[in-house]
Image (cartoon, rainbow, N blue to C red):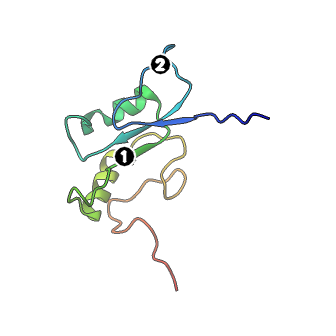
Amino acid sequence: MSTRKQIIYIVAETYAPPSTNGNGGLGFIGMQRCLDCSSSPIADLASRQAAQGWATVFTLNEPDINGITPAQAASWYIEYVNPLPFPNGSIIRPSKKLSPLSPILLPPVKA
């Protein structure tokens, strides 16, 4: 018996790849790979997400290598990614947005 697997998502650093019919049928995961750069301008993030219908976006590829601190990454995420209208709300709680006043994103682990 033959087992076939389907590709359901495709990831690239900037724009969805073209398809022969204009709709490849794949759920594209967008990526904002840097704080703001010519290949991935932050000013275009919301319009790219809206135009391409992303349900997910990956952000800040290897921020520690690029000298981005956790606090800087969290502040950037709250400003640019959290406002995007994703179907399932934020990663913390459904339909809740992160507070820019919160110093940490996850609760501490209790021993």
What amino acid is labelled 2 in the image? Ser
Name the quadrant of the N terminus. Answer: top right
Observer-side mark, 1 or 2, equals 2
The one of 85 and 49 positioned closer to us in this rendering: 49
Q: Horizontal placement of 6 versus 92: left or right?
A: right
Q: Quick check: 12 above or below 102?
A: above
Query: Which residue is nearer to you in this view: 1 or 70?
Result: 1
Residue assigned mark 2: 19
Tell me which amino acid carries mark 1.
Val
Under circle 1, the secondary element is helix
Direction from residue 58 to residue 26 in the image, left or right: right
Q: Residues within 10 Å of mark 1 (few under 14, many from 20)?
A: many
In the rendered view, would you say 3 is above or below 34?
Answer: above
**Residue 92 at x, y = what percent?**
49, 59
Residue at the image point whose x is 72% and y is 36% from the top: 3
- Residue at image coords 28%, 56%: 63
Badge 2 density bin: few <14, some 14–19, many ≥20, Cα 10 Å: few
Q: Position of residue 2 (x, y in %)?
A: 75, 33
Q: Which residue is drawn at 24% across and 47% down?
A: 35
Mark 1 and mark 2 residues within 8 Å of each other at the beta carbon: no
Residue 74: image location, x then y, percent:
32, 59
Q: Name the residue under label 1.
A: 81
Mark 2 or mark 1, which is nearer the start of the sequence? 2
